[in-house]
Image (cartoon, helix red, strand yellow):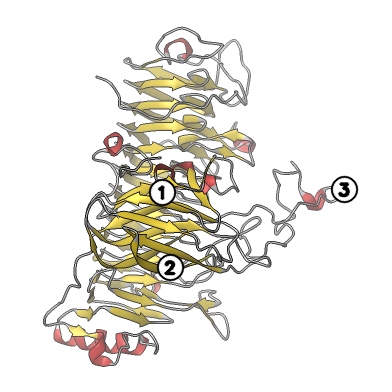
Amino acid sequence: MSAEPVVTRAALDPKLVEGRGADVAFFEQEAENGVTTGEVIAGRDAYTLPSEASGRAAVMLDPGEHVEFVLPEAANAVTIRYAIPDAPGGGGITAPLDLWVDGGHRHKVTLTSEYSWLYNTYPFTNDPDASVLQPDWWIAECACVPSQTDPTPAFDTPFRPHHFYDEQRVQLKKTFAAGSVLRLEVPRKSNAEWTVIDLVDTELVAPPVVVDGAVSVTDHGADRTGRRDSAGAFDAAIVAARDRGVPVYVPAGTFRVDRHIIVDDVTIIGAGSWHSIIRGSEVELAEPASDGSTHTGVGFYGKPANEGGSSNVHLEGFAIEGDVRERIDDDQVNGIGGAMSDSTITGLYIHHTKVGIWFDGPIANTHVTDTVIADQIADAVNFHRGVTDSSVSNTFVRNTGDDGLAMWSLAEADARNTFAFNTVQSPVLANGIALYGGSDLTVEGNLVADPVREGSGLHLGARFGAEPFAGAITFRDNTVVRAAPLDLNWDIGLGAIWLYALDRSIDADVLIEGDHYLDSTYNALMLVTEWGVKDLYAIENVTVRDVRVDGTGTSVVSARSMGSAAFENVDARNVGARGVNNCGAFGWDWVNGSEFSLVDLGGNDGLAPTPWEPDLHPWLGRYVPNIISCEDRPAVVAPPAPSPWGP
């Protein structure tokens, strides 16, 4: 614990990730690095509080206890990431927290778990007492299908609790100088048995932006106190602004909007995401909509693609605060949705919606930048179906209930899209960044940290009915830390980056170049084909070049597929097991070797201090081209914390 500010990025020394991830306005400080009277909790096992914490560690406070941080720079705003208990029957509670600065300047904060605490198997439930939701599915806890098992197994409840954390933004009453001490203290009479503080982000927020010449939503009756619904005023302002050829302006205030705002050929600018808040309740529909939705809620939507979609939409500088507390996949309760081409989304804060941004294509030339998306029930961004020439860049994502950033080529291929220089932290389920089919896709310069279960940091998956991969698929200069978790269903460890052939082979030109894989719980790179199709599908044409691996619990490469990959200048250290775990398609052909071949292009170096390989040697050399070196579930050796790479 330190009395000095310890600024991190994804719980790492910023020097380790310089030039990667989103360039954000705030300074992250982890609670475990602060001064506390509470207890530091740590660990990576799914369904536990530390597993979902940034850096896999946090501070648990009992009533009366505190944790302190020192401001590294002047700040007038704080984001607190925390967890508190659920209500006994589900649905959440509220509890107090006192925020003090320099021993005074008290701010009373009300925490909530109303948007946290999901349970059970997909699609999850808010009920902690629910029995297994999918009794016809394989359940890892019993290694069985419950409905086909006699006697039917019973599971302790709550079963698989997860999605513990939430965050709250607090504007301070004044600007405090660097060196000021910020204390988070749980009142002695708190109704919460415990309060976990994961981290704080501190920020100097600029004054509200004023847009001259725009049509203000308040000119058309919008209520900036949030007491009256302002959806109609937004509609009217959009019509007026389009007629005049000027933007819509959303001034500082909180505006209640309980349905979708349809946008087309319009620019909407707020006073800044800390100042202009558009908040809505989730509303149950009298009857399901044509798209299957049973609820609606706040969101900005382009027209559906089958109606021509929208274009020339520009959304900038405001917050969308949703009210989504359960996962209903048919519901269109996303922050931004529909189809928007030739459009931009810049400087938004999207919170408590189902998916922050879900585009149903085909659309083209749409770009998301400088945006923060937090505490989603499902994805942060999904390019779904025929999204082309589009991008997400310099965007910060934390605590998604599914993939952080995804491209899903369902029915129509995504093409020529880029995810670049984004930060994705703590996806509770699935992957940090995932590609499901498509052509000529690039994932570059991103920082991904702490995926928890059923996914990992970077993922290339021929699955979910996606169109084939084609052209050049490039992962370049990304950093992935504390990824490669145990897949509970398979009972094997994943890779920080993993390629998965389920629906078909992967045979596009896949380049993995310049990535850094740090502190991987299991493997750095995993290539796997589903067991039922292991003799049908392969993973081919993969090149891995100029990659650094600093710490694996098991191997650098785990191959569980037919196919091949080439390696050049891959440097590895602190490797827990044999450098290559080559099982191929489990054909055990000791004469001809594994069905997976590794091509050594030179420069592959490292140290693998294990009982099998005690000496210094190139990690790859003895395994090429296709020596079977398969250990199905090698023992895990936890690596040391990442450190700077020497010359």
Point out the frontmost of discs 1 and 2.
Answer: 2
Labels 3 & 2 near each other (Cβ < 8 A): no
Residue 485: x and y, percent? 53, 38
Looking at marks 3 and 2 on the same chain, the residue that comes earlier in the sequence is marked by 2
CA neighbours of label 3 inside 10 A, class few (<14), some (14 to 19), many (20+): few
State how far apart marks 1 and 3 are (Cα): 41 Å
Nearest to viewer (mark 3 / mark 2)? 2
Where the C terminus falls, by quadrant? Answer: top left
Where is residue 478? Give x, y as percent. Answer: 32, 38
Q: Residue at 20% x, 73% y: name it.
A: 208
Quarter of the N terminus within the rendering: top left
Q: Secondary structure at mark 1?
A: strand
Give the residue type that dot 3 points to: Asp
Q: Secondary structure at mark 3?
A: loop
Q: How far apart, in angstroms, are the residues tagged by discs 1 and 2?
A: 24 Å
Whether residue 360 is visible, yes or no, is: no
Task: Look at mark 2 in the image and give the residue it sits on.
Answer: 109
Tag 1–tag 3 contact (CB < 8 Å):
no
At label 1, the amino acid type is: Gln
In the image, residue 196 sits, relative to residue 615, either above or below, namely below
